[in-house]
Amino acid sequence: MSGGTPQIGSLKRTLAMLEAVIADGGCSSVTELARQTGTPPATAHRQVTTLVAENYLVATCNGRHVAGARLLGLLHRLDEKQILASVAAPLLHELAARVPGAVQLGTFENDMVTYRIKTGRGARALFTRIGMQLEAYCSGIGKVLLTNLPQPEREAYLAGGPFVPLTERTIVDPRRLREELDAVREQGFALDDEEIAGGLRCLAVPLRRPDGLVLAAISVSQMTSSRNRMEDAPLLALLRHTAQAIEWQAFGGVRARLPLVN
């Protein structure tokens, strides 16, 4: 078909009503929600009745509704970070085709960075692997994730040393590490300048939800000795654009293409 696969309009309208009920939080009647959404009242009542019958909604008092057991069960099964990684994967593969080095995505669990995506021409030479966990204080991704922890959690991490020096450049003093994280917050990106391994340089930027919560970070790692190494400024611009594209696709519903690299 020239127009692609057709959509089911009635399903879209029912999903919109489900979203309206959840956003309302049980404050309004179905008739009130119908008026707010521009839905015919009879249609709105049929939609909500169907959602109640399927346990996606449950009736409370005075004709109000809230999330039902089936919907709550689905929410508990979601891994928001892995969903974001799945959305990010195609865009990170695009980025990897345009930059020298390894492109990665990591998340923060139990004071460690979990690597969920690894791709690019330099990926094989890099010691990380998908599913591996590494210390956060000495990597670009780790610094971004530490920076965006709630302050009590960040301070607890800084107080939980000692931090082992992996190279002579590794920041191991908690005071200096705090200053480094403050700088990351101010500039919006992190740099690992041979701190996790000699000869390896990494730039990283955050991936944020619309409410500002950082769920993950993406990075490009390059060997300092590489003749094809991209300079920090254009690499950072590409990373930031890629992050914006991932966020837009994950939370805005539209896929953004990356800019061409001259």
Image (tube, rainbow, N blue to C red):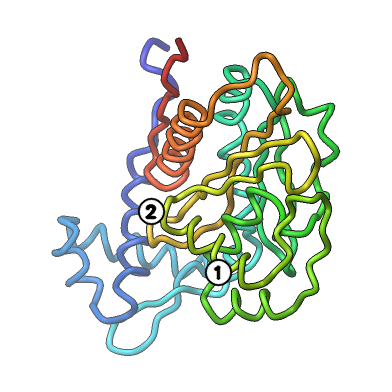
Residue at horizontal 74 percent and vertical 69 percent from the top: 110
Label 2 or label 1, whichever lies nearer to me, is: 1
Which numbered marker is on residue 15? 2
> Which amino acid type is shown beneath numbered disc 2?
Leu
Determine whether 26 is above or below 126 in the image. below
**Residue 149: which disc?**
1
What residue is rendered at 45% in x and 73% in y? 67
Residue closer to the observer: 187 or 34: 187
Residue 211: x, y in percent?
Answer: 38, 62
Q: Would you say 195 lies left or right of 217 here? A: right
| Label 1 packing within 10 angstroms: few (<14), some (14-19), many (20+) | some
Q: Identify the mark at residue 98; answer none if there is no mark.
A: none
Q: Nearer the viewer, residue 22 or 85?
A: 85
Locate the C terminus and report the quarter of the image it occupies: top left
Q: Residue at x 48, y 58 (%)?
A: 183
* Residue density around tag 2, few if under 14, some if 14–19, many if 20 or more, within 10 Å: some
Image coordinates for residue 32, horizontal then vertical, percent: 17, 72
In terms of depth relative to the viewer, which is nearer, 169 or 215? 169
Quadrant assignment, res 48: bottom left
- Between marks 2 and 1, how big is the CA–CA gap? 34 Å
Position of 31 compared to 57: left or right? left
Q: Position of residue 260 (x, y in %)?
A: 44, 14
Q: Residue visible at 56% across and 74% down?
A: 69
State whether residue 25 is above or below residue 23.
Answer: below
Residue 261 falls left or right of residue 164: left
- Tell me the SS state at disc 1: loop
- Three-letter code, disc 1: Leu
